[in-house]
Amino acid sequence: MFVGHLGAGLAVKAAEPRWNLGVLFAAALFADLLLWVLVLFGVESVGASVQSGRARFFTFAFPISHGALASAGWTLAAATLGWIVAGTGTPRRARLACTLAIAVASHFVLDLVVHVPDLPVAGGDSAKLGLGLWRAMPAALAVELALAVAALAVCMRRVRPCPLARRAARHGRRGHGHPDGTGPLPARRAAARNHPGRLVARHARRHRRPGIRRGRAGPMGGAAPRQPLTLRQPGIASRRNPGDAPRPL
Ligand SMILES: [Zn+2]
């Protein structure tokens, strides 16, 4: 089972969105990740596949990573780790610790449903557990897939999308295309036409005050340069006040 464990991580994410989804996936797959590390070090082993009815199964010797007692220990360790990294506030720490522990514990529960009896209770020589849904592999795959799809649907409803995705959805509803500039060309042209800067410029053109006119055309056909501002000083003639010119004595 792989997709089913990912579904468990998604379900925990839906219940507690503050956990990083990658952390929850790692927690839900922790037993399998540990199994392969221990196989590399020769502590646990995966044997050749054997025929059982119409299905073939690998044989495992994995009391540390997949044992019932060991899984309880890993769950307790996950709860402790969650409590430590959750920050301050007892309710927050308790909730985050519990959800991380549930993600780890879900691995044993799901494996218990699908594995043939090969999950040891405590140690390699102890009794083995497993309900054996793998003997009906199509049903096992259907259950696994249904669990993952249902968890994904719930997670997408509960977890808020990122801001860019929200903007994209809003622009998509208005027919303006994606905010990064992609989307249908007519929609992008419409968005550019209604850009706030262009709307302000259009408004200014329509409501220009009648007393303010552009300068007359200059000798080269362009607008005449503006007259520089001058200070009115008594006794000095200006263009608007020729009477201020000094009179001859
Ligand atoms: Zn497993």
Image (cartoon, rainbow, N blue to C red):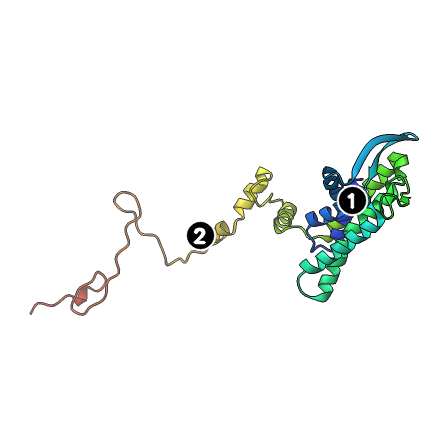
Mark 2 vs mark 1, CA separation in Å: 63 Å
Quadrant location, ligand no. 1:
top right
The response on whether ligand 1 sits within 8 Å of label 1 is: yes
Residue 85, image quadrant: bottom right
Answer with left or right where residue 170 lies relative to residue 228.
Answer: right
Q: Amino acid at mark 1?
A: His
Mark 2 and mark 1 residues within 8 Å of each other at the beta carbon: no
Mark 2 residue type: Arg
Relative depth, front residue between 106 and 129: 129
Q: Is residue 102 visible?
A: no
On the image, the x and y values in percent for residue 187 come to: 59, 41
Q: Is residue 170 above or below residue 2?
A: below
| In this rendering, position of residue 135 left or right of residue 237 | right
Question: From what the image shows, is residue 231 above or below residue 99?
Answer: below
Q: Nearer the viewer, residue 202 or 7?
A: 7
Give the residue number, with chain letter if any, for mark 2.
Answer: 205
Residue under the point 75% across and 57% down:
79
Q: Which mark is residue 238?
A: none
Q: Residue 247 versus residue 122: which sits nearer the camera?
A: 122
Say which mark, if any, is on residue 5: 1
Tell me which corner region of the image, top left, top right, bottom left or bottom right, holds residue 232: bottom left
Residue sitting at the far left: 249
